[in-house]
Image (tube, rainbow, N blue to C red):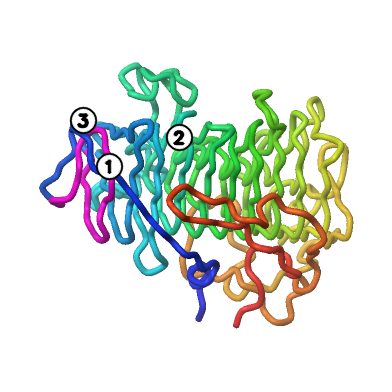
Amino acid sequence: MKTIFKNLSTAFLFIIIITAGGCEKANIDVDTDVDSGASSGEVSGVWVKGTTHNITGDVIIPQGKSLTIEEGVTVIMDPVAKTEFIVKGNLYSLGTADNPVKFTIQEKDRTADNKFGKKWGGILATPTCAELILDYTILEYGGSTTSDASTSVKLGLYKAVAGENLPALWFSNVNGKLVVTNSIIRNFQEDCTYIEGGNIIFSNNLFYTTGVSGGEAMNFKSGCLVDAAYNLIYSTNTNAFKLSNAGLRNPQADIVAYNNTFVNTGWRRPTAKGGSIWVENAVIAHIYNNLFANARFGIKRDTKSKEDARTTISNNFYYGYDQATVNQFQPSTDIIGGTNEVRGTTAGQNDPNFVNYPLNNPVSSPDFNTSWDFHLKSNSIALGKGTTNFVRHFSNPITFSNGLAYASPAPATFIGAYGQAK
């Protein structure tokens, strides 16, 4: 049986040229016993393929420097120190399908009681970070709560106050380049990502078991130009996508979200904002070919602060196992309908025919089974219902200073993140 992970291994083919500088002097504790090539304190250069790095204090990539993390590297974060990974320079985390990079905690610290992480901070990229790539990278068990002693608070990063739950990834350079592809973000307390600007691609990623009482998978603000495609988002506490122009940075937030699959999203947030795609505050949103299975609301707007009138929505697919689910995604004042949609009115109508997923799975469960397969069977009515007649931002690749180049994937004629099973 094919699983969803096999789809990731053939998503893209890139020619990679990597250059990196030497390591800087240490000033923050990093255990170098495991890997003789590890650096400590302010880090840059290369973390070599297959090595393990035990991080016991906050790590900072200095402005003007770069760190390249090669395939198979494991980065062990300290759950006592609540370590933060701060990027003032550039970060290139370059795993492979067989040997991903992993930011995690020790096995003994992964228990049923901390499935929502909170054990370390996150990757926090300051406005001086020009380039950041996460390719075949796993981020897990983070999202700790800041205190007055947190380095991020002292440096004025993210929301810069004590008591905030850190995201897995914060990026904040409106002129920067950010690519997150073929990666997994899981077991985080709140937001998976919080993005405040940049030229951005999110593609072929998997998000699950995130959000205790709030939090989005992808949270985009003003200053962002984004292509987000072929992502699977399962049971986020709040929205899969929060699309907003908040912050009044230039350019105006403009997000193209296409060929994503949303399953059970939004039900664990018992307020109006819990849903699947939330649009607000003059964001320009282009939403195509997305599959909503037992997801709450579908596409919902803030009626007091609406999306930009240039927003376009079409060729999305909705399924609800029970009538209550079907009723709540019908178009209304705040639920946005599009054109050429597959949207029924009765329970069980328009079964997407996933290869392996129980459609009666409780929507309140954040637990993910890696044997599920969200490819489509040959008789799925989601096949052939998508559109390719729209423009994405990065059909021409985003090029990086080290020779890497990533284009956003072309849209498909099927709806959802995965096509027909082979």
Q: Main secondary structure of the magenta part?
A: loop
Is residue 268 visible in the rendered image? The answer is no
Mark 1 surroundings: few (<14), some (14-19) or many (≥20) residues within 10 A: many
Residue at 64 percent of width and 37 percent of height: 224
Q: Residue 32, position in %: x, y?
A: 14, 45
The stretch in magenta equals: 35-55
Tell me which numbered mark, 3 or 1, is placed earlier along the sequence.
Answer: 3
- The three-letter code of the residue at mark 1 reads Met
Q: Is residue 352 above or below residue 285?
A: below
Q: Is residue 260 above or below residue 357?
A: above
Q: Residue 57, position in %: x, y?
A: 23, 33
Q: Secondary structure at mark 3?
A: loop
Mark 3 surroundings: few (<14), some (14-19) or many (≥20) residues within 10 A: some
Check if mark 3's residue and mark 2's residue have beta carbons within 8 Å: no
Image quarter in which the C terminus is found: bottom right
Left or right: where 53 falls relative to 259: left
Q: Residue 355, position in %: x, y?
A: 61, 76
Q: Nearer the viewer, residue 233 or 257?
A: 257
Q: Which mark is residue 207?
A: none
Q: Nearer the viewer, residue 207 or 35?
A: 35
| Residue receiving disc 3 | 28
Mark 2 surroundings: few (<14), some (14-19) or many (≥20) residues within 10 A: many
| Residue receiving disc 1 | 77
| Residue receiving disc 2 | 129
Q: Secondary structure at mark 2?
A: loop
Left or right: where 166 falls relative to 327: left
Left or right: where 90 falls relative to 411: left
